[in-house]
Amino acid sequence: MGLKEDFDKAAEEVKKLKASPSNEDLLELYALFKQATVGDCNTARPGMLDLKGKAKWDSWNGKKGNW
């Protein structure tokens, strides 16, 4: 299997975990997925009332320059 196939398989396997990962782990997985599929964060930071969106954005933006 190639790297893309391995990545796609791993992304699908995460959805099937029996135990739910912690919020910190989910944010890390989100950031790594976005960095690998989109690259550096290319959107504006969500507004101050969007706490979940800001947490996801901050996590992804923290990966800027990796890969």
Image: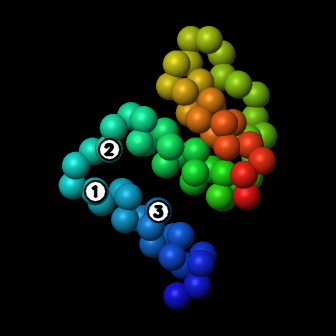
Which one is earlier in the sequence, the residue at label 3 or at label 2? Answer: 3
Q: Residue 2's spot in the image, x, y percent?
A: 58, 84
Element under label 3? helix
Q: Mark 1 and mark 2: span between their CA atoms?
A: 8 Å
Vertical relation: 6 (above or below) 16: below
Q: Is 39 situated above or below 21? A: below
Would residue 30 be found to the left or right of residue 21 on screen?
A: right
Mark number for residue 17? 1
Residue 15, by quadrant, is bottom left
Crowd band around label 1 with a 10 angstrom C-alpha radius: few (<14), some (14–19), many (20+): few
Total numbered labels: 3
Q: Which residue occupies the foreground of this view, 39 or 49?
A: 39
Q: Secondary structure beneath disc 1?
A: loop
The x and y percentages for residue 67 are: 73, 58
Residue visible at 52% across and 88% down in the picture: 1
Q: Which mark is residue 21?
A: 2
- 3 over 56 or under it: above or below: below
Q: Residue, x 63% and y 32% (percent of image)?
A: 57
Mark 3 or mark 1: whose residue is earlier in sequence: 3
Mark 2 lies on a secondary structure that is loop
Q: Is residue 36 left or right of residue 52?
A: right
Q: Amino acid at mark 1?
A: Leu
**Residue under the image location 55 percent in, 27 percent down:** 55
Q: Using the numbered discs, state the Cα–Cα distance from disc 3 to disc 2 in whole angstroms.
A: 14 Å
Residue situated in front as seen by the camera: 51 or 29: 29
Contact? badges 1 and 2 (CB < 8 Å): yes
Q: Pointer 3 and pointer 2: residues touching (CB < 8 Å)?
A: no
Residue receiving disc 3: 11
The amino acid marked with disc number 2 is Pro
